[in-house]
């Protein structure tokens, strides 16, 4: 037989089989309706179950019948059906309402559970129908019947057909009118039945939920004493319905307990201090269409007046957008008018593109290059500056609002620590301060100073300084070349003075000090007093703050104290040891007339670069481990690492190492175990110097471990939040390119807003009036999740397992 005829015959057989199945299904539905109408309500269809072997099936089992397991596997004309009774569980809820009995039938399509009203009797028989579980209001009788349809393996039924079958069955069985509505979404179809108003979602295979959006969980109010079911694939757990208020309170308490017990990241802790704001997400989509395709589409448009297809389309281009006006050439009717003033305002599409360019850290050249590659229109530099200035202004306003909210949060956090405001409402706080520049060295045109609260790690204030203005420099150059007169220059200065970008005159190196003075002087207006400053060891900033008001300080007699960043303080040891090595050398004359430097304390067994790095590492570890203790403990820990690494068999110096068998010092462990100490020659980190050189290194250690210096490090605070913020700022403002004042202002304000409240709340698309799309909302949530997750510390992989017990501090 030819191939086409074979396929045709198979299709005919399949069609006949499907037709027979439909007829069989209608017949079974009529029989079920007749039985329900004539059945005696006093005689149960199933034998009663004793209390010993009484079994229940949850609603989740009725709803979550696996389509794969429920499908009948045909084996040579034999059909296998399994009817399964469930176990009795007093805590399992099965159906909603006051229903004592349940009748259920199963088929071979996605599982559906539905409930009816107060019907006296229920009987359901399944043929080729989908799985339907029906529940009566107060019926003592239960009827169950199971039959497998002889359907094709490739046959699939949609959710709409399932809902239609449910409505038919409910109408035939229940004389009370039942109203069923189907709401279909991309993933879930909800079948709502009245008057019971029971909602059951028909979801993806193996997933069915009711009242609570949790996979594989069904909820109910009252448990039924007797349930019979057929072809239940997987048992699930039923959960009683809980009021929404109770759920909210329970989840809040659980989150609070979890946050106390589980370590969270600094970013998540910062963002959690602010109120949650749900942004309005718009479902508008931007459609890009070629001109030819659009003209083809417009050719099918007809005039609403004369119904002619002679419609003229006029394009009005404005920046990156195109406004379309339509009119009829026959009756001269205007179908679509051109909006007024469209070319005098900033449109949405161009604003979005410019804002995206600013967030990615690009400028005008990058903007026009990208548009040219994407075959999009370009705009002039003046138009680009209009958009950027508007976006920068909105960003600064948003940042100021966030900073005002941040200061209120800081006051509340300090009030929890019993730091109450004074009579004027001013609170004393501790801040970490650091400055950053646009370019390296001391020739940058922009300098930024940021103050971050040391307790909450939130930015409380910042200042941007600029010592260059392009317009002023241009006018001065024209004046020198006598292209303009002095009067013209003076008139320009008077008009431009308020808009001038230059707000600082001096060297770039002093920008950090000047920004600190401005921040400290206006702190009282913000009801805050920066009593403690954590700096990187630069005495110029602290000195400038203390010399304000003729040496009285910024707060008229109240002294500002200083604390050291332990990371920067550990670098002091490295710098001073490196300087000691470089300064102590002798020059050796070579035969070729050249000279070679021979260092006194550098070489094998002395202060090599590896040895200096290890000593600085031990110094920093002891500062970090001794935080919150006392000065003597911190000093002894630092000196212990120094003496431990310089000890020999002839002169062991382990008197400051921690004693006991659990000590990191191998010498103290041997003494505690009454064993002979091993040789010091096996130590990995060790150095041996001459007495004079040893005393010089010892003097450096003693100078760095003075009482006043140890008191500054006792809190163990760092400037890591400032360094993290600096990296975020310059990601929006590339250091390798020339930048204007408005670009730096946007980068600082936008980075501070993101650092404090996260990506989702700091995004300016809603404040700019552009609206937030679903795609952007998802992206912002993903970025917040990545920012707030707890990152494990990265450790360097060692090539081989090395015994670290011979190192100071047990590194």
Image (cartoon, rainbow, N blue to C red):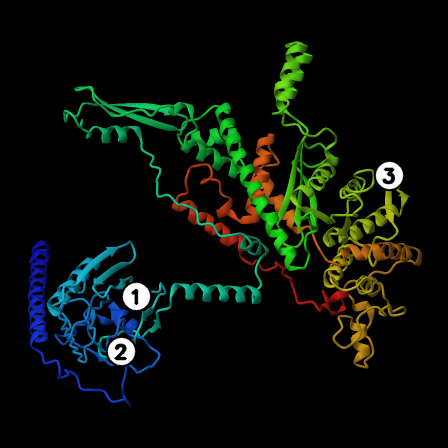
Residue annotated with mark 1: 208
Residue 460 in percent (x, y) is at 63, 46
* The label number, if any, that marks residue 224 in the structure image: 2
Residue 743 or residue 303, whichever sits in front: 303
Separation of residues labelled 1 and 2 (CA atoms): 19 Å
Q: Residues within 10 Å of mark 3 (few under 14, many from 20)?
A: few
Separation of residues labelled 1 and 3 (CA atoms): 86 Å
Single out the residue that lies furthest toward the front.
423
Q: Would residue 662 be found to the left or right of residue 452 on screen?
A: right
Residue annotated with mark 3: 594
Q: Is residue 610 above or below residue 325?
A: below
The quadrant in which residue 673 appears is bottom right
* Of callouts 1 and 3, the N-terminal one: 1
Placement of the N terminus among the 4 image quadrants: bottom left
Secondary structure of the residue carrying numbered label 2: loop
Residue 736 in percent (x, y) is at 61, 35
Residue 25 or residue 165, whichever sits in front: 165
Secondary structure of the residue carrying numbered label 3: loop
Q: Would residue 580 be found to the left or right of residue 31 on screen?
A: right
Placement of the C terminus among the 4 image quadrants: bottom right
Residue depicted at x 33% and y 77%? 92
Q: Residues within 10 Å of mark 1 (few under 14, many from 20)?
A: many
Circles 1 and 3: CB atoms closer than 8 Å = no
Q: Is residue 511 visible?
A: yes
Q: Would residue 649 be found to the left or right of residue 531 on screen?
A: right
Residue 712 in percent (x, y) is at 78, 54
Single out the residue that lies furthest toward the right.
692
* Of callouts 2 and 3, the N-terminal one: 2
Residue 266 or residue 11, whichever sits in front: 266
């Amino acid at each position: 037989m030819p191939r086409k005829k074979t396929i045709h015959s198979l299709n005919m057989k399949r069609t006949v089989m499907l037709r027979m199945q439909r007829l069989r299904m209608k017949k079974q539905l009529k029989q079920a309706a007749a039985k329900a109408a004539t059945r005696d309500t006093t005689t149960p269809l199933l034998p009663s179950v004793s209390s010993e072997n009484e079994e229940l099936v949850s609603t989740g089992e009725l709803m979550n019948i696996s389509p794969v397991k429920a499908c009948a596997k045909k084996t040579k004309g034999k059909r296998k059906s399994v009817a399964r009774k469930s176990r009795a569980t007093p805590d399992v809820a099965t159906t909603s309402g006051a229903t004592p009995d349940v009748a259920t039938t199963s088929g071979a399509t996605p599982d559906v559970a539905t409930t009816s009203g107060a019907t006296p009797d229920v009987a359901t028989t399944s043929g080729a129908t989908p799985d339907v579980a029906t529940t009566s209001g107060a019926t003592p009788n239960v009827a169950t019947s199971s039959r497998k349809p002889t359907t094709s393996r490739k046959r699939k039924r949609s959710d709409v057909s399932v809902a239609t079958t449910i409505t038919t069955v409910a109408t035939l069985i229940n004389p009370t009118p039942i109203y069923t509505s189907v709401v279909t979404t991309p993933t879930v179809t909800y079948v709502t039945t009245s008057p019971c108003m029971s909602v059951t979602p028909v979801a993806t295979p193996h997933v069915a939920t009711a009242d609570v959006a949790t996979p594989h969980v069904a909820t109910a109010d009252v448990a039924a004493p007797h349930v019979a079911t057929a072809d239940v694939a997987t048992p699930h757990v039923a959960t009683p319905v809980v009021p929404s208020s109770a759920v909210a309170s329970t989840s809040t308490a659980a989150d609070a307990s979890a946050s106390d017990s589980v370590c969270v990241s600094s970013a998540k802790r910062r963002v959690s201090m602010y109120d949650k704001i749900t942004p309005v997400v718009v479902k508008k989509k931007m459609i890009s269409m070629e001109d030819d395709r659009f003209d083809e589409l417009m050719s099918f448009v007809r005039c609403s007046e004369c119904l002619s297809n002679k419609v003229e389309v006029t394009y009005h281009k404005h920046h990156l957008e195109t406004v379309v006006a339509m009119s009829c050439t026959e009756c001269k009717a205007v179908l679509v008018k051109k909006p007024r003033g469209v070319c005098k305002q900033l449109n949405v599409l161009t604003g979005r593109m410019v804002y995206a360019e600013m967030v990615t850290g690009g400028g005008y050249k990058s903007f026009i290059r990208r548009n040219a590659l994407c075959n999009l229109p370009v705009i002039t530099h003046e138009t680009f500056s209009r958009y950027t200035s508007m976006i920068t202004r909105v960003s600064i306003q948003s940042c100021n609002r966030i900073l005002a909210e941040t200061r209120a949060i800081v006051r509340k956090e300090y009030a929890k620590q019993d730091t109450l405001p004074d009579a004027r409402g001013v609170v004393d706080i501790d801040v970490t301060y650091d400055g950053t520049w646009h370019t390296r060295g001391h020739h940058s045109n922009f300098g930024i100073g940021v103050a971050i609260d040391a307790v909450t790690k939130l930015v409380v204030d910042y200042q941007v300084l600029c010592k260059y203005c392009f317009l002023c420099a241009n006018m001065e150059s024209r004046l020198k070349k006598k292209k303009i007169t002095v009067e013209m220059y003076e008139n320009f200065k008077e008009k431009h003075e308020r808009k001038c970008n230059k707000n600082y005159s001096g060297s770039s190196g002093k920008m950090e000090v000047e920004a600190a003075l401005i921040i400290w002087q206006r702190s009282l207006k913000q009801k805050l007093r920066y009593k403690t400053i954590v700096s990187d060891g630069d005495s110029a900033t602290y000195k400038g703050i203390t010399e304000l008001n003729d040496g009285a300080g910024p707060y008229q007699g109240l002294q500002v104290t200083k604390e050291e960043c332990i990371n920067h303080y550990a670098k002091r040891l490295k710098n001073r040891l490196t300087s000691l090595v470089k300064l102590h050398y002798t020059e050796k004359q070579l035969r070729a007339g050249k000279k070679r430097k021979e260092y006194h304390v550098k070489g094998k067994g002395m202060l090599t670069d590896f040895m200096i790095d290890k000593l600085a590492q031990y110094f920093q570890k002891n500062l970090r481990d001794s935080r919150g203790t006392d000065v003597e403990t911190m000093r002894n820990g630092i000196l212990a690492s120094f003496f431990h690494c310089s000890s020999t068999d002839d002169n062991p110096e382990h008197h400051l190492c921690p004693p006991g068998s659990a000590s990191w010092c191998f010498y103290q462990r041997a003494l505690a175990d009454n064993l002979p100490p091993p040789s010091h020659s096996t130590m990995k980190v060790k150095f041996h110097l001459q007495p004079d050189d040893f005393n010089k290194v010892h003097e450096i250690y003693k100078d760095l471990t003075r009482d006043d210096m140890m008191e500054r490090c006792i809190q163990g605070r760092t400037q890591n939040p400032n360094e993290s913020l600096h990296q975020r700022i310059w990601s929006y403002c590339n250091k390798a390119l020339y930048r204007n004042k408005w670009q730096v202002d946007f980068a600082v304000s936008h980075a501070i807003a993101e650092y404090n409240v996260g990506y989702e709340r700091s995004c300016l698309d809603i404040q700019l009036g552009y609206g937030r799309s679903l795609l952007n909302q998802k992206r912002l949530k993903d970025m917040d999740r990545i920012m707030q997750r707890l990152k494990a510390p990265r450790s360097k992989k060692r090539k081989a397992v090395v015994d670290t017990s011979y190192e100071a501090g047990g590194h």
